[in-house]
Image (cartoon, rainbow, N blue to C red):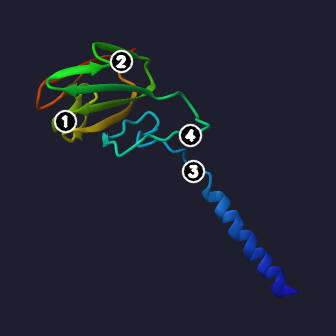
Amino acid sequence: MMRRAMAVAAALMVVVGVLAGCGGEPATGGASSAPPALSSGTVAGGPGGSSAASVGPTTRVIAVRARGGQVSGETGRVTVPLGSPVTLSVTSDVADEIHLHGYDRQAEIPAGGTASISFTANIPGIFEVELEQSKLQLLQLQVG
């Protein structure tokens, strides 16, 4: 009888342990969901995933493409609310570095690839986003 009770207790502990491990953060597809602290840039590795139930504000994705020295997508001045999560996603035909001035965030971008910078827009103002080596301005980010 004692062995059976111990076996049931052990099985119950395993089930509780498995269920406790299921309460992790939702998948974000490479973009950071870090609260107010800034996160580092990352190279996107594939299609982005999303969670069916999200907590907090939706991440604003700003997509830009640089090809042959020309920029397309969300260019010019792009406005985001203060405190909002933002992901800058840049596709380029040349290897370079995305640089978000003012926040001093950057990410290496391979030729023909896409890279992103995810952060919380917690510094008000207007900030240039450029391909650093090419000195190609992608957009101006207005936070406020």
Judge whether residue 127 can be spotted in this image: no
x and y percentages locating residue 92 in the rendered image? 22, 32
Query: How far apart are the two marked residues, 2 and 3, measured between alpha carbons?
Result: 32 Å
Residue at 53% in and 27% down = 57
Residue at 68% in and 70% down = 14
Q: Residues within 10 Å of mark 2 (few under 14, many from 20)?
A: some
Q: Which mark is residue 124?
A: 2
Q: Residues within 10 Å of mark 1 (few under 14, many from 20)?
A: many
- Classify mark 2: helix, strand or loop: loop
Residue at 62% in and 37% down = 53
Lateral position of residue 95 relative to residue 76, left or right: left
x and y percentages locating residue 105 in the rendered image? 27, 34
- Under mark 2, the amino acid is Pro
Q: Which mark is residue 24?
A: 3
Residue 110 position by quadrant: top left
Q: Is residue 53 above or below residue 63?
A: below
**Is the N terminus in the top left, top right, bottom left or bottom right quadrant?**
bottom right
**Residue wearing tag 1:** 97
Lateral position of residue 142 relative to residue 57, left or right: left
- Classify mark 4: helix, strand or loop: loop
Q: Which mark is residue 51?
A: 4
Q: Nearer the viewer, residue 138 or 6?
A: 138
Query: How far apart are the two marked residues, 4 and 2, measured between alpha carbons?
Result: 29 Å
Mark positioned earlier in the residue sequence (3 or 1): 3
